[in-house]
Amino acid sequence: MVKHINELPTPVRMTAVVSTENVQFLNVELSVEEHRIAYSLYSKPTDRNTILHHTSAHPTSLKNSIPRAQFLRVMRNNSKETVKQQQILGMKITFLERGYSEEVLNRALEEAKKKATTRQDTTTNPKLVFPMTFHNKSQKISNIVRSNWNVLAWDNTLPREFKEPRGFVTEGTGI
C-alpha cells in the first residue's frame, strides 16, 4: 500500500516501519517491557522546533501557558521516570532556544508537576456521556432526559451512575 501511495503524482511520500518491539503512533511510542506496556512521548526525527517564540506579540499569559501544557504532556505520556526526566530536560532546552527564560520555565514546570499530582481521578466522579449529533434542539433533548431521569433511576439493573443526573453530559458533534 505504501509503495502504491508513493507512486502517486504528489510530493507527499509515506513511510512504514514494522517492528515487533515498539509502535509509534501520533506523538506516543508504545513498547512491551517486562510483560507490561510502556509508553513515552514520541517525536519524529524530522520534527523541528516550531514553538511560539517568547518575543512574539502574543499575550504573555498565552506564551506562559505553552511550557506548562507541554511539560504536563511529557509527564502524562511517560510510564518511565528516567525517560520522563530526559524529555523534560529536552523540552526545557527547546523552550530556551525559543527565548523563554529559566524563571518562566521553572515556574511552568512546578505548575505542571502540581497539576499532574493533583489530577482529578475520573473514577471517583464519573460522568455519564450521552453522545448525539449536534442539532439546534440538542439542549431540549438534554432537558427532556434530565426531567425524566427518575424513570432511569427506578431500573435496578443499571449502574449507580444512572441514579443521579449530576454527572450527565450531552455531547453534540456537528459540522
Image (tube, rainbow, N blue to C red):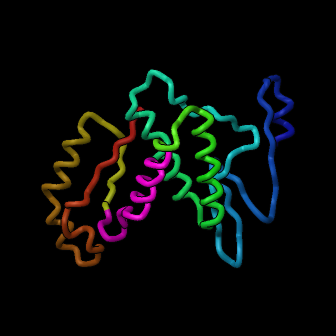
Q: Quadrant of the C terminus?
A: top left
Q: Nearer the viewer, residue 2 or 141?
A: 2
> Residue 162: x and y, percent?
25, 67
158 left or right of 47?
left
Q: In the picture, residue 121 is in which quadrant? A: bottom left
> Residue 83: x and y, percent?
65, 61
Instruction: Identify the residue at image location x=26%, y=34%.
Output: 136
Q: Is residue 56 above or below residue 28?
A: above
Q: Nearer the viewer, residue 157 or 96?
A: 96
Q: Is residue 122 above or below residue 95?
A: below
Instruction: Identify the residue at image location x=39%, y=57%.
Output: 115
Instruction: Identify the residue at image location x=36%, y=69%.
Output: 123
Q: Nearer the viewer, residue 122 or 11?
A: 122
The magenta segment? 105-126
Taking the magenta stretch, the answer to whether it contains residue 47 is no
> Residue 160: x and y, percent?
26, 74
83 left or right of 128?
right
119 left or right of 71?
left
137 left or right of 62?
left
Taking the magenta stretch, the answer to whether it contains residue 113 is yes
Q: Nearer the viewer, residue 134 or 167?
A: 167
Q: Quadrant of the N terminus?
A: top right
Q: Is residue 164 above or below residue 129?
A: below
